[in-house]
Amino acid sequence: MLRNRVIGRRAALGLAAAAGLGVASTTVTGGRAAAAPLLPPTCAPRYPGYRDVDFAKPYAKYFEPRTAPPQAVVQQAYAGPALTPTAVPRFESLTRDLGPTGLSPVETGYGRSPDGVVFVAVRTEMPRVTAAMWDWWFGWHSTEAARYKLWHPDAHQFAALAEDRTGRPIPDKQKYIGNTTFVDEYVGPKLQQLAINFRDPVAHGFTVPADQTIVFGRVGSSIAPVDLGWLAHQVRPIPGGAEMRSRFFLNIRGLKVPDVVQAACAVARGPAVDPSDLDLSLELGRDLLFHCGSEMNHLARFLPEIHAEFS
């Protein structure tokens, strides 16, 4: 079943500060303190848009200069009011919410519960798309920034994997489940540096038929040893294609062991650590609704073609 270990905001803030100290050690030589950074020899850069070298990639024909807007229902929810606090579903209901059949009272919207959990739901219809395409995508897209930018060229700026499994002869699900992706992206005006650890949905209580998939992950900081929430994307077949039902539950915090190399690289890129980021706002939830609706609608337009060519 879904479980989480919640830590207080004061403890989380202290851990975030400690994480900054953990990026480099300090040695004393001749009475003077000298920083001994743990940076690897090279760290991939964060950059907006596409570079000249990106256009030599075999998938460059799928690059778009701007991200497609979200579907009308998402734009309406973004322009409208937030859910009332009592209308926000509880995280514990997620496995029932994303069941094999049926719809939920809130399929697209955002809000903040009485206990401070920020909730986002986005439903996106995707003609010609299947669940298998999304399993492939989550195992393939995070090896380099240029691939990640295919998804949201306006906001995505960096991507890396804890373990590159893309070349292994294993099922697509096994390429991302148990793996962690590190990304720098803008959600609204705010740069986020995130570490998303993907979990086995069946082991967490979801029912996943063979023609469906659920991408389930723990969302945390790339730098601080703090998890910030959960995400889930369910893909189910509908006539002519598929529907994606996305859910985010933020401000459900926990402790994690940071990847020291990735944290050092995140700092080298220019850290976006702000203590206030550990208390995610309702406005960020609204921005995330628009961001998710945009990236899912954008990629779905050419996912069948890029999957057929590179899967």
Image (cartoon, grey):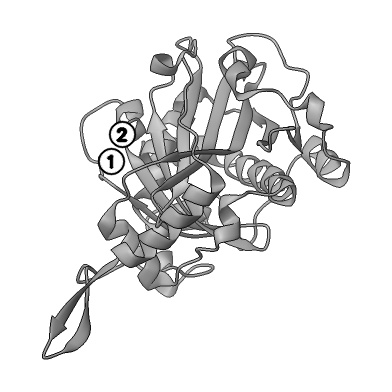
Between 44 and 14, the residue placed more toward the observer is 14
Q: Percent position (x, y) of residue 231?
A: 54, 34
Judge whether residue 121 can be spotted in this image.
yes
128 up-or-down from 193: above or below = above
Q: What residue do we see at 45% from left, 36% from top?
A: 218
Residue 99 in which image quadrant: top right
Rendered residue at 58%/19% (across/down):
92
Secondary-structure class at tag 1: loop
Task: Please give left or right for residue 185 compared with residue 225 in the image.
Answer: right
Task: Please tell me whether mark 2 sits on a helix, a strand or a loop.
Answer: helix
The percent position of residue 190, horizontal first and vertical second, equals 62, 62
**Which residue position is annotated with label 1?**
166
Q: Residues within 10 Å of mark 2 (few under 14, many from 20)?
A: many
Q: Residues within 10 Å of mark 1 (few under 14, many from 20)?
A: some
Q: Is residue 230 above or below residue 52?
A: above
When the figure is inspected, residue 68 is found, relative to residue 138, above or below; the finding is: below
- At a point 53% along the width and 50% down the height, the residue shown is 10
In 3D space, how far apart are the residues under numbered discs 1 and 2 (Cα atoms)?
6 Å
Q: Which residue is mark 2?
A: 175
- Labels 1 and 2 touching (C-beta < 8 A): yes
Q: Earlier in the sequence, mark 1 or mark 2?
A: 1
Q: Position of residue 134 (x, y in %)?
A: 48, 31
- Residue 155 is situated, as x and y percent measured from the top left of the image, at 59, 59
Left or right side of 268 for 38: left
Q: How many marks?
A: 2
Point out the image quarter for the C terminus: top left
Residue, far right: 80
